[in-house]
């Protein structure tokens, strides 16, 4: 693997990990399907992602997660469970796609960059949902959940096609949301 291929696999891993911060199971499902269709290779320890039982369970988990995030109050409770799950899934998914990196390099990158990307995305969406709950009484939360789902499906597909663009998109998303939250905080009297 040359330097450019290694950089692309790291970018792919970071983008997939960041999308796990939006929804835990949807990016895993997209990845499993991509592996099953032969579009993507994963490290041998992660070949299970492409099995029919894994894809079936990820599909069921994705539907359950989507439905749960559509219910105000349940969505905020789910964030408490989703945060650690997103970190673990982000690390695992990013490591899975860094196929040709040696383990002493792959795992620190997966933990720091993959786990970090998943954690930041999950934290921002949780903060955004909490703000939405306070400002709208939870009425806007299903709308946010829909946008998060779209992102959780779109970003992995984009990452498979153009990993660097997917990373840039996730960075832009984080910057925009943090600025909106900061602007709202400044305009709200304490």
Image (cartoon, rainbow, N blue to C red):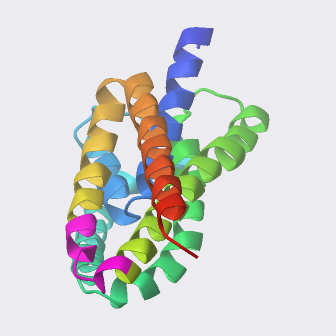
For image coordinates 75% across by 33% down, the residue present is 105
- Residue 139 is a magenta residue: yes
Q: Position of residue 139 (x, y in %)?
A: 22, 81
Q: Quadrant of residue 138?
A: bottom left
Q: Bounds of the magenta span?
A: 135-145
Left or right: 15 as drawn, with respect to 147: right
Say left or right for 20 vs 64.
right
State the residue in front, 141 or 84. 141
In the depicted view, which residue is nearer to us: 68 or 182? 182
Please tell me whether residue 144 belongs to the stretch shown in magenta: yes
Q: Quadrant of residue 137?
A: bottom left
Instruction: Say which residue appears at 73% left-offset and 38% top-offset.
Output: 103
Q: Nearer the viewer, residue 46 or 179?
A: 179
Tell me which corner region of the image, top left, top right, bottom left or bottom right, holds residue 61. Answer: bottom left
Q: Compared to 5, does 153 lie above or below?
A: below
| Residue 51 visible, this orientation | no
The quadrant of the image that shows the C terminus is bottom right
Q: Quadrant of the N terminus?
A: top right
Question: Could one spot residue 131 in this view of the protein?
Answer: yes
Q: Position of residue 53 (x, y in %)?
A: 29, 68
């Amino acid at each position: 693997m040359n330097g450019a291929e290694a950089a692309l696999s790291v970018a792919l891993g970071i983008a997939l990990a960041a999308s796990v911060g939006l929804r835990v199971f949807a990016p895993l499902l997209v990845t499993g399907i991509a592996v099953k269709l032969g579009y993507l290779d994963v490290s041998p320890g992660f070949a299970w992602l492409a099995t029919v039982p894994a894809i079936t369970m990820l599909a069921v988990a994705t539907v359950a997660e989507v439905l749960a995030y559509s219910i105000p109050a349940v969505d905020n409770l789910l964030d408490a469970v989703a945060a650690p799950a997103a970190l673990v899934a982000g690390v695992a998914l990013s490591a899975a796609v860094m196929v040709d990196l040696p383990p002493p390099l792959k795992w620190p990158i997966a933990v720091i960059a993959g786990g970090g990307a998943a954690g930041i995305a999950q934290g921002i969406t949780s903060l955004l949902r909490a703000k939405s709950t306070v400002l709208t009484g939870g009425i806007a939360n299903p709308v946010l959940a829909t946008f998060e789902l779209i992102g959780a499906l779109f970003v992995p597909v984009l990452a498979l096609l153009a990993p660097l663009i997917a990373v840039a998109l996730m960075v832009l998303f984080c910057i925009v949301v943090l600025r909106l939250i900061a602007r709202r905080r400044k305009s709200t009297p304490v």
